Amino acid sequence: MLQLRPNCECCDRDLPADSPHALICSFECTFCSTCAREVLNGKCPNCGGELVRRPIRPAAALAKHPASSERVRRERCA
């Protein structure tokens, strides 16, 4: 199950579970659409994988399986 991390690892922007602006790689590294496009050129700086839109978990499922509250932050993004 996806963790649905609460923030962009690059700029620390809040990314709620229902955000259409959250992108992830296959390891669930999480970035906002702005950083993914303008800073990272669509590639995860951690693994080099493609960044794709994170799915939005339906509200009923989110109540049973909440998003992570653990914030992850990289020291440098570029």
Image: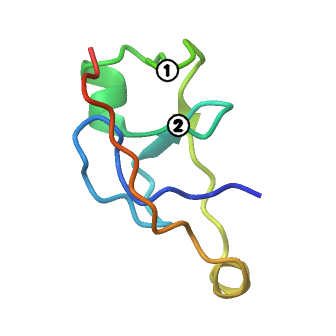
Mark 2 lies on residue:
29
| Mark closer to the chain start, 2 or 1 | 2
Q: Position of residue 27 (x, y in %)?
A: 65, 34
Q: From this view, report whether residue 65 is shown above or below residue 63.
A: above
Q: In the image, residue 32 lies at what x, y percent?
A: 35, 42
Vertical placement of residue 16 versus 11, above or below: below
- Look at the numbered disc 1 and give the secondary structure of its residue: loop
Check contact, mark 2 vs mark 1: CB within 8 A: yes
Amino acid type at mark 1: Asn
- Left or right? Give the position of 36 relative to 57: left
Would you call the spot at circle 1 few (<14 residues within 10 Å), some (14-19), or many (20 or more)?
Answer: few
Locate the N terminus and report the quarter of the image it occupies: bottom right
Q: Is residue 42 above or below residue 75?
A: above
Q: Residue furthest right?
A: 1
Instruction: Tell me which residue sits at (65%, 67%) in the image.
Output: 57
> In the image, is 41 to the left or to the right of 3?
left
Label annotation for residue 46 = 1
Up-down relation of residue 78 to residue 35 (above or below): above
The quarter of the image holding the C terminus is top left
